[in-house]
Amino acid sequence: MSQLEWTSAAGGPLTGTILVPGDKSVSHRAIMLAALAEGVSRVDGFLEGEDTRATAAAFAGMGVHIETPSASRRIVHGVGLHGLRAPAAPIDCGNAGTGMRLLAGLLAGQRFESVLVGDASLSRRPMRRVIDPLALMGARIDAEPGGLPPLRIHGGRALRGMRHALPVASAQVKSALLLAGLYADGQTEVREVHPTRDYSERMLAAFGWPIAFGEGWARLSGGHRLRATDVRVPADFSSAAFFLVAASLMPGSDLVLSAVGLNPRRTGLLTALRLMGADIVERDRREQGGEPVADLHVRHAPLRGIDLPPDLVPDMIDEFPALFVAAAAARGITRISGAAELRVKESDRLAAMARGLEALGVAVTEHPDGADIEGGPIGAGRVDSRGDHRIAMSFAVAGLIAAGPVRIADCANVATSFPGFLELANGCGFALSAQAAAQR
Ligand code: S3P
């Protein structure tokens, strides 16, 4: 057995203009709502990642005809709210927590039974957070001990709308409940401890479903219809994040990232990097498919450590691996707290980043809900991405500015969110190579 290993070596300054792939969260939701809508929807800028393709395959397996006229495009022939057919086999969500959790809500409202499975990482991720509130609505979902996948969803149950107060800030849980709410009797309302990304709410409205929502809350009733609409997916801020950090750290860099989605619930890293001294300018702010986008112009600037305001955490929940690298190269100490959720992502990201940076000679003190990172020189070494796409890409950034090559184990899962990362990165100044390595 071999696995994919990367080597990231010192590169040139990052220059030019690049377009990163489409937003993962938006791509998942676009397929789901288009599948349940009446009529034909076009999705442009669809992320050709393994996660989002798994979601498209799930609906194809439930009788939805989805055409791929060209890369990053889908034409979805919606079957209506009650038009899905029972899948012939378990639905494989791959690596995608978003796919599994949103599907759990949506499938709870179907007349048929379904089973959701995932890869090794997804099979370790907590599902009680969706199972329990869905059960309160009348759903029956069986899981493995500890609330782990696979999930067996017993359809054919009448769902009741209700008011949920969510204990964790999670757009996935919120979205699962809203999707179940489409099938429920009466009103479903979700209240959040901290507002999270509102793509489900915005997209439900775009597909014609009556929904009221604001900062930290959303409310809808069952019994309406979704009408087909076209979706234009913005470039994924989370994919742009690696380049924002890399260009900030690499002397001489002057890079433009085109048409990046700037939903305010996603851009906490921009605020954090600016607090650290980064030089990132938004150009040509505009609206694309109902979402704010802008071109981001980033130039090298010396960064300094900060105490990360805990309020920013939910708005940058996927960007911590990149922030760890920025912190490692900044002057002084960066303190992160209130981020325990990072332990239940595709990997335990606090541990993965702490161990990886330590292997490169950086001093990190890990806490239950964060870490203190002491900026300083980054050395050569070998790190383990733990099969986590964002850990792998973050250490590719570390290699760019390290004293010697950084070897990164287990990088194949980068394809879940950012197919073509290596080529795009090398095209603007990285020196990344991939090789098959014997599995250890
Ligand atoms: C997502 C929500 C977040 C995020 C994930 C995508 C979404 O997860 O980390 O990458 O699309 O709703 P949580 O809801 O677990 O915070």
Image: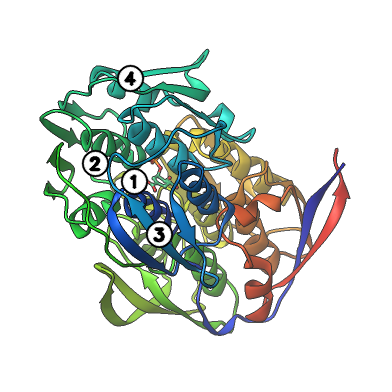
If you read the primary sequence from the N terminus, does the residue marked by circle 2 or circle 3 appear first?
Answer: 3
Residue underneath mark 1: 314
Amino acid type, mark 1: Pro
- Label placed on residue 76: 3
Residue underneath mark 2: 194
Q: Position of residue 8 (x, y in %)?
A: 74, 64
The Cα–Cα distance between marks 3 and 1, rounded to whole angstroms, is: 32 Å
116 to the left or right of 36 = right
Mark 2 C-beta to ligand 1 under 8 Å = no
Q: Is residue 26 above or below residue 372?
A: below
Residue at 31% across, 67% down = 230
- Can residue 303 be seen here? The reply is no
Q: Secondary structure at mark 2?
A: loop
Residue at 16% across, 42% down = 218
Mark 4 C-beta to ligand 1 under 8 Å = no
Marks 1 and 4 in Cβ contact (< 8 Å)? no
Marks 2 and 4 in Cβ contact (< 8 Å)? no
In the image, 269 versus 48, the foreground residue is 48
199 to the left or right of 413 = left
Q: Position of residue 345 (x, y in %)?
A: 51, 38
